[in-house]
Amino acid sequence: MIHTKQFFSRSMVANGHQLVIEGPVESEKLAAMRFDEGLKAFRVPEEQQQALVEIAALPEGRIIVAREGDLVLGYVTYLHPDPLERWSQAKLDDLLELGAIEVSDKVRASGVGKEMLRVSFMDDAMEDYIVITTEYYWHWDLKGTGLDVWEYRKAMEKLMVTVGMVWMATDDPEICSHPANCLMARIGKRVPHESVVAFDGMRFQNRFLY
């Protein structure tokens, strides 16, 4: 199930920067942009840009960016879960993972992340998807924000709730490896019952062992 991606764009001012929040951005357009030096949570900006260009080229891939001119200061990615992850086992075409959300420290703590998520879900096609996010504390910028793991976890939950994502229990070993890790999900209004059942089956796989 691949839907036509409807493009949306909004403007905002963040820490004195006039930003355009837009997407899903096509891979060719993304390749022509520059990535701010502060976008380094996962890898160096140039390598992260290439990774996002490849995601944008996928049939299901969606990239939302916050840019000032051609300089990207934030982004959110959506794609099918990694084949090596539990969440790909049911091979659900209507399951997307919010793979990464990152905001440069130049515009951090100004609502950019929240606005990128809002633009993400302006597209009515998202009502056909289960969208998940797996939050692992080792991905969080604790040093850059000065927050401890619980403060960061609370901030992430507060952010995701703004677009209807809710905490969901799971026995996934990686998530269970630390109490601050969590699974959150948003089930679209038109997701069929059988997909929800299959998703629940992936959330709990060891229930008979207890």
Image (tube, rainbow, N blue to C red):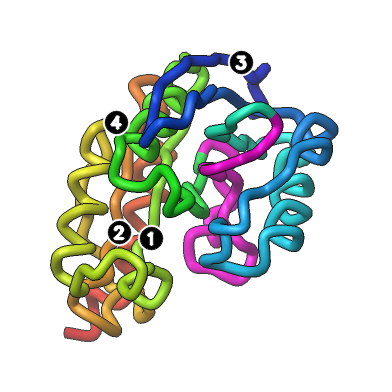
| Pointer 4 residue | 163
Q: Which mark is residue 134?
A: 1
| Pointer 2 residue | 183
Q: Residue furthest front?
A: 16
The range drawn in magenta is 70-94
What is the spatial separation of the Cα atoms under label 3 and label 4, in whole angstroms? 18 Å
What is the spatial separation of the Cα atoms under label 4 and label 2, in whole angstroms? 15 Å
Q: Which residue is drawn at the image coordinates 21% and 50% (left, top)?
A: 157
Q: Which residue is drawn at the image coordinates 36% and 47% (left, top)?
A: 108
Give the mark nearest the N terminus, 3 or 1. 3
Query: In this picture, is 68 found above or below 113?
Result: above
Query: In this picture, is 122 found above or below 185?
Result: above
- Label 2 sits on what residue type? Leu
Report whether 190 appears left or right of 53: left
Q: Residues within 10 Å of mark 3 (few under 14, many from 20)?
A: some
- Label 3 sits on what residue type? Phe
| Pointer 3 residue | 7
Towards the viewer: 147 or 187 = 147
What is the spatial separation of the Cα atoms under label 1 and label 4, in whole angstroms? 15 Å
- Label 1 sits on what residue type? Thr
Q: Residues within 10 Å of mark 2 (few under 14, many from 20)?
A: many
